[in-house]
Image: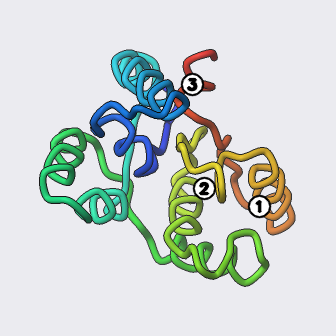
Amino acid sequence: MKPLVYVETSVISYLTARTSSHLVTAARQAWTSEWWEIAPSHWDLRISELVIREAARGDSQAAQRRLAALASMAIVEMTEESQILARRLIEIGAVPASEPEDALHIAVASVSNAEFLVTWNFAHLAGPAAKMKLQNHLREIGVHIPLLTTPEELMES
């Protein structure tokens, strides 16, 4: 059985965006494309309805590219338990109140027992300080802790 990976929306955005002229962003786009090619043979990739909603926002052509990339992906249900956990993550300060969707991504990954949450969101998910804060809070409240990682890091495993 392959490890379950919850794919957060930023990964799809990097995958489908026009190549950036910013060196770091272009590298992340390249790593995302490389990871996307090998991922299905190594991991069980899942998204949620939230990923689909977020991918559908913004420029219509970019949204079409994002939604096309998501078309065949399996969906993890956003349960009442995940909604409650997301609210709890905000209440305890694990995620800023201004970022309820980030809290919901974490909660869905946790409740679905994903081994990994793959993202390019460094501010609230994948940055070292954010990871430590989230892991500590999730441990304190006694819920499953998915490993918060980027496509680049996951490719190395």
| Relative depth, front residue between 99 and 72 | 99
Q: CA distance from mark 2 to mark 1?
A: 9 Å
Mark 1: which amino acid? Answer: Leu
Q: Can you give x and y, in whole percent of width and height, for residue 57 in the image?
A: 26, 65
| Relative depth, front residue between 150 and 105 | 150
Total number of numbered labels?
3
Q: Are marks 2 and 1 in contact (CB under 8 Å)?
A: yes
Question: Residue at image x 48%, y 34%?
Answer: 22
Quadrant of residue 130 within the rendered picture? bottom right
| Relative depth, front residue between 17 and 118 | 17
* Apparent side of residue 76 relative to residue 111 in the rendered image (left or right): left
Question: In terms of sequence position, does the residue under pointer 2 or pointer 1 come before the other?
Answer: 2
Question: Residue at image x 47%, y 22%?
Answer: 31
Label 2 sits on a secondary structure element that is: helix
Residue that mark 1 sits on = 138
Q: Is residue 94 above or below residue 110?
A: below
Question: In terms of sequence position, does the residue under pointer 2 or pointer 3 come before the other?
Answer: 2
Question: Residue at image x 25%, y 64%?
Answer: 58
| Relative depth, front residue between 2 and 133 | 133
Quadrant of residue 141 within the rendered picture? bottom right
Q: CA distance from mark 2 to mark 3?
A: 21 Å
* Apparent side of residue 151 relative to residue 88 in the rendered image (left or right): left
Mark 3: which amino acid? Answer: Glu
Quadrant of residue 13 within the rendered picture? top left
Residue that mark 2 sits on = 110
* Apparent side of residue 104 relative to residue 30 in the rendered image (left or right): right
Identify the image quadrant of the C terminus: top right
